[in-house]
Image: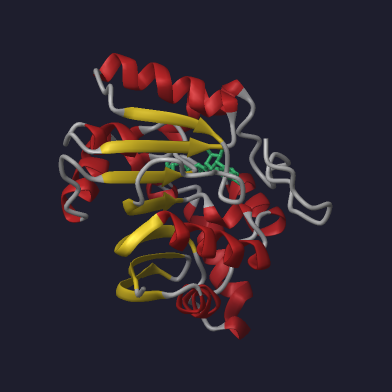
Amino acid sequence: MVSLPNWYFDESKMAGVDFEDPAQAESFDLKQPSSTPEKEQALVSRLGIKSGQIVIDLGAGTGTFAIQASLTGASIHAVDISQAMLTYARNKAHKAGATNIQFHRSGFLTYKHCDHLADLVVTKAALHILPDFWKMVAFLRIASMLKPSGRFFLRDVIFSFPPAEHEAALQAWIELAAKPEGQGWTKQDYEMHIREEHSTFAWIIEGMLKQAGFQIVEMNHVSPVLAEYLCEKLW
Ligand SMILES: C[S@@+](CC[C@H](N)C(=O)[O-])C[C@H]1O[C@@H](n2cnc3c(N)ncnc32)[C@H](O)[C@@H]1O
């Protein structure tokens, strides 16, 4: 057990949604239609994951992406801080016959990668749990887990609206919750996300990725509140 300095962030105390609650794990897949097996399979193809590669999924949740990635024959490390999510994901992987996934109860700031350096690190809808300083620490740690020219894929609630327009942009997002494209999360969930979690501006994330030694090779501001980045480690 590595001892951490007193000033280190305690990532077991999660902001916002309590993913330690088994009820959250049970209902998660229904709320998160952006992570169906079909959509994750498409992402696996898009990222070119193949047999022999080592892939780390940070904040792996109920494991849908990890399972689809493992079906290529790649070795997957599915990392999550929540025991409830990991238990659910393990059962799902067992049912899917996905044997090449190692599950780790750990997080962005504590996961110690003991395998060969990874070809790819993925994190989806999880990084916003960390305040910005700690996102930067997480990016440095992710870079250290990757082989030279290894890739990092990030998708999250990230804001690309003009800062002065935040009230209207956030209100428009909250209103989506009541509609089909609101993805199963409620208005109250979105309000809590803004109030208690740590989503930030795209220009902050992009600066941090560069500071951590990444080149952004694909950038997609999917909507004013959702962005994805495919990055390559420069060294
Ligand atoms: C919204 S879910 C996203 C799950 C999955 N990546 C997806 O795309 O559907 C966020 C996940 O991040 C996990 N999490 C929260 N804090 C974390 C941390 N510090 N390190 C790693 N995972 C964390 C939660 O337990 C939860 O499973």
Q: Quarter-wise, where is residue 168 in the image?
A: bottom right
**In the image, 171: left or right of 15?**
left
Q: Picture coordinates of residue 80 (x, y %)?
A: 52, 37
The front one of 82 and 189 is 82
Residue at the spot 56% in from the left edge and 50% down from the top edge: 108
Residue at the spot 52% in from the left edge and 28% down from the top edge: 85
The front one of 156 and 96 is 96
Q: Quarter-wise, where is residue 196 in the image?
A: bottom right
Name the image quarter holding the C terminus: bottom left
Name the image quarter holding the N terminus: top right
Residue at the spot 33% in from the left edge and 37% down from the top edge: 76
Number of marks in the rendered image:
0
**In the image, 75: left or right of 13?**
left
In the image, residue 195 above or below residue 96: below
Q: Picture coordinates of residue 73 (x, y %)?
A: 18, 34
**In the image, 28: left or right of 188?**
left
Residue 44 in view here: yes
Residue farthest to the right, as pictured: 6
Q: Picture coordinates of residue 193 (x, y %)?
A: 63, 53
In the image, residue 2 above or below residue 199: above
Q: Picture coordinates of residue 159 (x, y %)?
A: 51, 71
In the image, residue 175 above or below residue 167: above
Snapshot colouring:
secondary structure
Residue at the spot 40% in from the left edge and 59% down from the top edge: 154
